[in-house]
Amino acid sequence: MLYPHLRQLLPRAKNLAQHAQSFRANSILTKHIVPAGHGYAFAVKRGTRFRIVDLHGEQVVDFMAWVSTPRASNSRPEAKPLPTFEKMSTAYTRYHLRGVTPTIGEALYSNADRALLRITADTVKVHDMTFMACFPALYEKKGMHGHRSCAQNVFEVMKEYGMRDILEVSEPFNCFQNTPNYSLKAMGSSKPGDFVEFEALEELVCAVSCCPYDIDGFNGGNITDVAIVISEEKTGEIQEQEKTIA
């Protein structure tokens, strides 16, 4: 569902299709709202660009990605692609970038030492590659039984892509999260409408969790929705249809 206020919040950098020569004009935008404290998974093809957008500010988003492979030829047409053992690795990324988080034009690497995603636009420029996804036992040890967690969120949404165990959840790229290792900015550095944009360099299955950690003022002390905006190039058939309508 697309919230009515999304149109006002997304074009913070003047125009979605023009900012930093990122989203291509000849593209179709698909928008999805990730509810506060929940997750979302989506598949992208090589060359696809997508944005993770903080709609209300100071909301951390755990992001993960796996190289995907198509289902068997005899599978149902609607069958989801399968993630492989190759996945985005914050450790390999730290190695390539000498410990700092990537900036525009730099990449996130896989555990097979390949570039999987390139950052093509970023209005925050503060992210984290240090901390794991929060997990159920973390909250249980604090007496908060049944509290949602990023690991559980990702596991839930990745089940339809074949994930069978929560231990398959990988280490995240924590969008919009600041740590003392990187910057003296506030812990939650993003403002309403801020985003980070990626370009897929391989066929991928991606997952995000709108982090539900609401302790000690983290996430601004208030868990809020975020958005995923995917830009896909128009096919020749769609372009011809538009010409006919025009």
Image (cartoon, grey):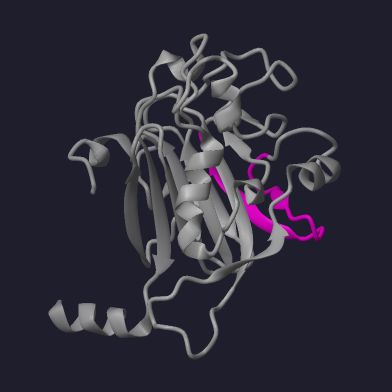
Q: Residue furthest top?
A: 216
Q: Quadrant of the C terminus?
A: bottom left
Count the marks: how many?
Answer: 0
- Can residue 114 be spotted in the picture? yes
Residue 116 drawn in magenta: yes
Task: Give the residue drawn at x 54%, y 22%.
Answer: 139
Q: Position of residue 4 (x, y in %)?
A: 17, 40
Q: Is residue 180 above or below residue 96?
A: above
Q: Is residue 197 above or below residue 5?
A: below
Quadrant of residue 138 within the rendered picture = top right
Task: Give the residue drawn at x 46%, y 62%.
Answer: 160
Q: Nearer the viewer, residue 17 or 186?
A: 186
Quadrant of residue 6 within the rendered picture = top left
Q: Nearer the viewer, residue 71 or 6?
A: 71
208 vs 97, left or right, is: left
121 vs 29, left or right, is: right
Residue 131 drawn in magenta: no
Q: Residue furthest left?
A: 245
Q: Nearer the viewer, residue 204 or 104?
A: 204
199 vs 113, left or right, is: left
Q: Position of residue 40 (x, y in %)?
A: 43, 49
Q: Residue furthest bottom?
A: 74
Q: Position of residue 105 (x, y in %)?
A: 66, 49
Q: Is residue 189 above or below residue 168?
A: above
Task: Give the residue drawn at x 39%, y 24%.
Answer: 223
Q: Position of residue 101 (x, y in %)?
A: 71, 35
- Can residue 122 be spotted in the picture? no
> Which residues are the magenta region?
103-123
Task: Give the residue drawn at x 51%, y 40%.
Answer: 152
Q: Is residue 104 above or below residue 164?
A: above
